[in-house]
Structure formats: structure tokens, C-alpha cells
Image: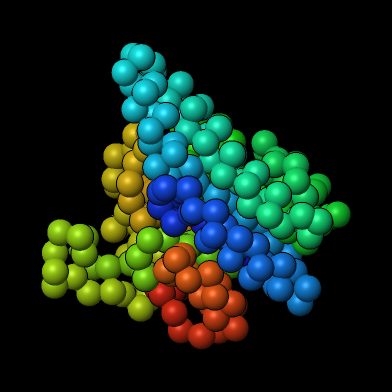
Amino acid sequence: MNIVLRIGGSVIASPLNPWLILEYSKILEKLSLKGFKLLIVTGGGEFARILIENAKIMNMSQESQDRVAIQASRVVAQLLAEALKPTASVTIPRRIGEASKLLKKHNIVVMGGIKPGMTTDTVAVSATVKLGFDVLIKATNRDGIYDKDPSRYPDASKLDSLNFKELKDMFGRIHYEAGLKTIIDPKAARLIAKHRVKTIVLNGFKPENIELAIKGVKIGTLIYG
């Protein structure tokens, strides 16, 4: 099975969490030994948002803010790649095509953002589509998708599954801006729905959840059909 794993910056970079990054490296190495091909896409999290705020203070454009955030996500990706060597490539690809070439030599490749206006969520979905991988797993700071924001509504309920139309209706109309905080960004939600990408959203603070999801255990929220 070929998998794209999107690890949210809210999980490993808010603040930077070296111990959790090391935990991920152990789980991912184990999966690699079992024959899985994995493309990991990391976010910049709090690290990126601090840089974005500084760019705003300097009156920089949203495109400039995005470029700064991309570099943060790539630093986080480098940390994970270094923890994974020699299993993973230590080269952080700047394009999905470059990632594809690296995956011919390595079972694991790690990358961050690639261009302004394109979040790491969108990078992960686009990579899943372009590489023809089987599933996209998103590791977040929640244990799935809720019917409303659980940080604001105590009666929010976790959804075990969503179809593509429901996903698009829920997230596809959110306005994008640099540093946007949402469990799935609007463009990524639209792409998942358009290309019918099987997606699992789960709690990323427990890296073992990745293994469970791959084994078919019902965990998090399944987006499918």
C-alpha cells in the first residue's frame, strides 16, 4: 500500500516537539520495513505562524507570508527526515515530481510546502492524486472531524465518516489566508471531493494511530464515497 501522511504543524510544531518527531520516525521505519511506500507532508504550525506574524509587522504581502511559512514547514520536514535516515531521503523535495523520483529510491520521502497559495494540506492531496497513492491520512490535533468546532461548542460530536459532498459543504467555502487554522483547508477539501480521495483524519498525538488506520481499524473520521 502507498500512503500520503500529512502531519499537522499543530501536532509536531506547536511548539516543535522533538520527542514526538522521534516517535513518528520509529513508527514510519516499521511501516517501511513492512513494504509500505510513504510520502510525508509536514506543516509549520506555531513555528510558521510566528514567522507570518513577523512578516505582517513588516507589511509583507500574503505571498511573502506564504513563502516564509513554506520555509518553516520545510525545516520541520528536515527534522523528521534526519530522524528517519537512512530509511528516508534527507533531500526535501520542492515539487511533487521531485518527490516521485525520490520515492523510486527510498520507501519514505518527507516534504513541506512548495509554493505560495498552496497549503501543505493541498500539497498532500495533490500528491496523493498525482502519485496515484491509495490513501491520504491526516494526523491532526483532534481525534477526527466534528459536526461543529469542539473548542467552542461542548456538545460537538465526532463524525465517524463523511462522504465527499459533506466534506465539501463543511470546509470548501472557508476563506483562505496565510496561517489559516482549520482541520482541512478549503482548497484541499474541494480537491478531495473532486478526485474522490480516500482520506482518514485522526489524532496525530498518538503516532500508533497511523498503524491502526492502515490495518483497517475504525479510528478518527473516514472520508469516502
Residue drawn at x 33%, y 46% is 181
Q: Is residue 82 visible?
A: yes
- Residue with the most extreme top position: 59
Residue drawn at x 29%, y 39% is 175
User: Residue 101's spot in the image, x, y percent?
Assistant: 81, 47
Q: Along the horizontal axis of the image, is 74 left or right of 46?
A: right
Nearest to the observer: residue 187 or residue 114? 114
Q: Along the horizontal axis of the image, is 22 left or right of 72?
A: right
Q: Is residue 122 visible?
A: no
Q: Is residue 101 above or below residue 7?
A: above
Q: Is residue 94 above or below residue 4?
A: above
Figure label count:
0
* The N terminus, quarter of image: bottom right
Judging from the image, the colouring scheme is rainbow
Nearest to the observer: residue 74 or residue 219? 74
User: Residue 36's spot in the image, x, y percent?
Assistant: 73, 70
Q: Along the horizontal axis of the image, is 95 left or right of 76?
A: right
Q: Along the horizontal axis of the image, is 208 left or right of 100?
A: left
Residue drawn at x 59%, y 39% is 74
- Residue with the most extreme front position: 19
Image quadrant where residue 150 sits: bottom left
Residue drawn at x 39%, y 29% is 52
Nearest to the observer: residue 121 or residue 45? 45
* The C terminus, quarter of image: bottom left
User: Residue 213's spot in the image, x, y percent?
Assistant: 54, 77
